[in-house]
Amino acid sequence: MDKQVWQAALPRLALAACLFPCVVLAADPELSIVIKDHLFVPAEIKVPAGKKVKLLVENQDATAEEFESHGLNREKVIPTRSKAVIFIGPLAPGKYPFFGDFHQNTARGVVIAE
């Protein structure tokens, strides 16, 4: 690379190096939920209000389950022994129930935005 080109690029590279840690810190918060024995574990999830959140849902059961929430406006089928990502928010402070559509009697939970 020519010396003049390198010298011209150096300030941009320095700026990019300074900004990189900010990009890493700005990532969406992540929380994990496990579906086991037709239950959501944990059944209560606390998230920061006003922020987008990434839910990692792992279905450990031998049957599929559907994560569904009218308040969160989300529904997603998680096949047998697989994982899924569900983005929620940003949410106003409050409680947002969710349930497993295929096992509504047992698979229940709530997201609490604070």
Image (cartoon, helix red, strand yellow):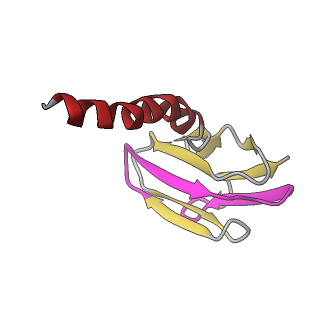
Residue 85 falls inside the magenta stretch: yes
Seen at 77% across and 44% down, the residue is 48
How many numbered marks have been drawn onto this rendered protein structure? 0
Q: As rendered, which of 11 and 67 lies closer to the eye?
A: 11
Residue 74 highlighted magenta (yes or no): no
Q: Quadrant of the N terminus?
A: top left
Q: How far across and down, in percent of the image, does residue 103 sit?
A: 59, 59
Residue 41 position within the rendered picture, expressed as x and y whole percent measured from the top left? 63, 38
Task: Find residue 108 and report its horizontal and vertical position in percent.
Answer: 70, 53
Task: Compare residues 72 and 101 and report the one nearer the observer.
Answer: 72
Query: In the visual, does 29 lie left or right of 48?
Result: left
Most extreme residue toward the left is: 1
The front one of 26 and 110 is 26
Which residues, given as a range, are shown in magenta?
Answer: 78-103
Residue at (22, 33) in percent of width and height: 4
Q: Is residue 57 above or below residue 13?
A: below
Given the current orientation, which residue lies at the most extreme front position? Answer: 4
At a point 63% along the width and 57% down the height, the residue shown is: 88
Residue at figure coordinates x 43%, y 29% from the top left: 14
> Would residue 114 appear left or right of 51 to someone viewing this image?
right
Q: Position of residue 105 (x, y in %)?
A: 68, 58
Q: Nearer the viewer, residue 81 or 16?
A: 16
